[in-house]
Amino acid sequence: MEIVKVTLYHIELPLLTPFITSYGAIKTKAFYLIEVENKLGNKGYGELEAFEIPDYTEETRETAGLILVNHLLPLIKGVIIEHPQEVRALLAPIRGNEMAKAALETAIWDLYGKEQNQSIQHLIGANRLRIPVGVSIGIQPSIEVLLQLVEGYVATGYQRVKLKIKPGFDQEPIAAVRKAFPELTLMADANSAYTKEDLPLLKALDKYDLAMIEQPFGFRDFVDHAWAQSQLKTRVCLDENIRCLGDVQLAHQLGSCQSINLKISRVGGLQEALEIVDYCQSHDILVWCGGMLEAGIGRAFNLALSSRDEFSFPGDISASNRYFAEDIIKTTFDLVEGEITVPSGDGIGVEVDWQVVNNYCLKQTDYVLID
């Protein structure tokens, strides 16, 4: 295939409720929908997931968009791509900027699947039709509100609950949820809110039978995480640290964690994610699929990846109505008995809802890649 045109749609979808972490509150899902087109007019789609400010990784939506347009698109101009596995090497001259790369690479995967009349799920060797999912709950104004939310999600069927924590809001909410739901698969996510001096706060969580504590320390730290894992009974999971397979290998060699939160956008695309899955499988590291508040296109990729057999732990995918009143695809991802059905059509198996896109699109820009 040869990509002859790329279109960026700047979209802002309102969230049903603000999502609050130790970083702050997110009220809208602001992102770029990426459309790639070949000479025959076939189109594939991806999402650029970088947030508006650089508080999760260094990338922002705007800087990633600039990198995509000014540095990544020229690398694929005039290139015949036989398989999307080749895209990672084509983009390699640009260092970092994983989310910009992932947006382009995943769109090309979708286009390739449509050209081959095959689903992404089939192309990556996955076959599960439905996958168990969990839900991530932001920091709440009170324990009472938190318990009400957890009760509602458990009643809906979510098989695992993740609680965002920070110093001053950790042991009390964890203890309250564990007391109310003694059998619930429960984990905590710190989003780098702690330091080595806070280890007693983290050790206090050992007694609550958590599945894991995610990203307690700094986003580029491996040494202190290894020290923490040696002190804690609870499994440490790394998220922000993991940008590529090499980071997983480093974490494994140092003993920095026992679990990886894998996000396609954070590691530069689907090909890198698949190699991380293979490494985790061969080295007995628990790997599961995290989320970036994706809209329907990104969520469809997450479902496809999670349908591989290696993903036994419920990921942060959730149903469409968890975050949005309206989504950018015509399919709705519904929770049925704690599971969501994986799209089975060509490519990622979903169709863009252009009425919704037009309603929430702030700007559309076309880039022609042929002279």
Image: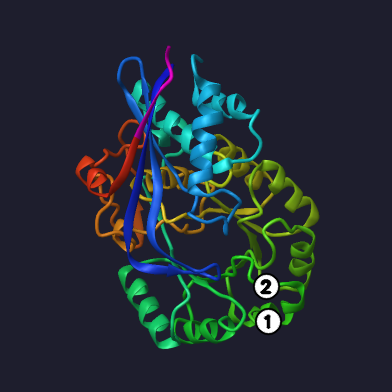
Q: Is residue 310 above or below residue 213?
A: above
Between 188 and 4, the residue placed more toward the observer is 4
- At mark 1, the secondary structure is helix
Gap in Å between the C-alphas at discs 2 and 1?
Answer: 9 Å
Q: Nearer the viewer, mark 2 or mark 1?
A: 2
Q: In the picture, which quadrant includes the C terminus?
A: top left
Badge 2 or badge 1: first in the primary sequence: 2
Q: Position of residue 364 (x, y in %)?
A: 33, 37
Which residue is depicted at the point 30% across and 19% down?
41
From what the image shows, is residue 251 above or below residue 10? below
Counting from the top left corner in percent of width and height, residue 138 is at: 46, 71
- Give above or below for 283 relative to 122: below
Question: Is residue 65 toward the left or the right of residue 113 in the image?
Answer: right
- Marks 2/1 in contact by CB < 8 Å: the verdict is yes
Question: Pointer 1: what residue?
Answer: 201
Q: Is residue 329 above or below residue 72?
A: below
Q: Which amino acid, mark 2?
A: Tyr
Find out whether residue 358 is within the magenta segment.
no
Which image quarter: residue 319? bottom left
Badge 1 amino acid: Leu
Image colouring: rainbow
Say whether residue 362 is left or right of residue 32. Answer: left
| Residue 333: mark in rendering | none
Q: How many marks?
A: 2
Residue underneath mark 2 = 194
Left or right, residue 152 beside residue 266: left
Tell me if I can see residue 242 in this picture: yes
What crowding class fits label 2: few (fewer than 14 Cα within 10 Å), some (14-19), or many (20 or more)?
some
> Range of the magenta residues?
365-371
Q: Residue furthest top?
A: 371
Residue 107: x and y in percent read 42, 33
The image quadrant of residue 282 is: top right
